[in-house]
Amino acid sequence: MGTLVLPFSLHAQADSFPAANGALQITPFVGAGVQIEYADMVLHVDPWSRGDYSGALPADVILITDTPADHLDPDLIHRLLKSNGTVIVPSSPEDARDEGGARRLRQVGTAHVMANEERLEIDLEGTPVIIESVAMYDLIPGEPFHAKGEGNGYIVTLGGLRIYLAGVTECTAEMQAIEDIDIAFVPMNLPNGRMPPSRAAECVKIIEPKVVYPYHYREQPIEVFIEALRGHPTEVRVRDWYPGA
């Protein structure tokens, strides 16, 4: 078989999407880190200091999907968060999966805890932000890396666009049930066969976002995911989530 030529950009860059009353900007950073900018409002997801955040914008809202260090980085959260900003986390220190996660949650300080399947609306100087938490967890039998209830994916509604940031999950029933997604960030998660590229592509076909960014894939065969969605109406956008790795 010949070498597969990828018709997609592999370098990190900001993307612009038409939204109500102006454009919405999305900038991938590193791992599962994403910056979303709309109408003078900035939202960060899972910022991680492994990436270069020197050009990042101060955050009105920071969403944390899980408590390992590559998703929950207290020092960077404090650097990014505006003085009146809001941090949303999936767990309190008392309910964290392990002591490392509990310690990091304590270091974050004041935060709003969202359990799975909750809805929160924040008004930021007249800009409504709707945040819905979606369960993210492992399905494969055995001791889970991600047990149900420990972490959140999030659906963020801004400017009439619905953005789904799945977190590190398999293709759960809760994920399959979401609808009307404009932009999705879908993970791949090995070891032990959790959400391999082919299964991630199958899940995309179920939820049918208009645009999908595969993320959290590191050294996995991203071309398998791309090829599985070739000809599907969902647009695949590949970015370099591990620059310099």
Image: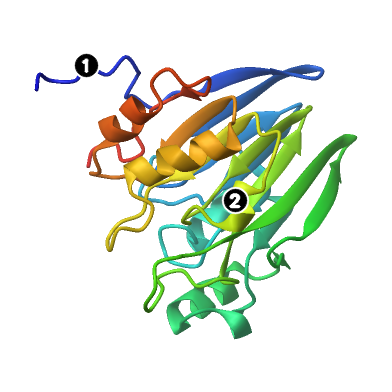
Q: On the image, numbered disc 1 is attached to which residue? A: 5
Quadrant in the picture for the C terminus? top left
Q: Is residue 220 visible?
A: yes
Give the quadrant of residue 222. top left
Within 10 angstroms of label 2, few (less than 14), some, or many (20 or more) residues?
A: many
Residue that appears at 79% across and 44% down = 130
Which of the colour schemes (rainbow, by chain, secondary structure, one colour) is used?
Answer: rainbow
**Camera-nearest residue between 143 and 10:** 143
Furthest-left residue in this view: 1
**Camera-nearest residue between 212 and 21:** 212
Furthest-right residue in this view: 126
Residue that appears at 40% across and 70% down = 145
Disc assigned to residue 186: none
Q: Is residue 29 above or below residue 138?
A: above
Quadrant in the picture for the N terminus? top left
Q: On the image, numbered disc 2 is attached to which residue? A: 175
Q: Is residue 31 above or below residue 23?
A: below
Callout 1, which amino acid?
Val
Residue that appears at 10% across and 19% down = 2
Q: Secondary structure at mark 2?
A: helix
Q: Secondary structure at mark 1?
A: loop
* Left or right: residue 98 compared with residue 60: left
Q: Position of residue 161 (x, y in %)?
A: 72, 29
Q: Position of residue 158 (x, y in %)?
A: 75, 33
* Left or right: residue 114 compared with residue 127: left
Callout 2, which amino acid?
Met
Q: Position of residue 92 (x, y in %)?
A: 64, 76
Closer mark to the observer between disc 2 and disc 1: 2
Q: Is residue 232 above or below residue 185?
A: above
Q: Position of residue 106 (x, y in %)?
A: 58, 76
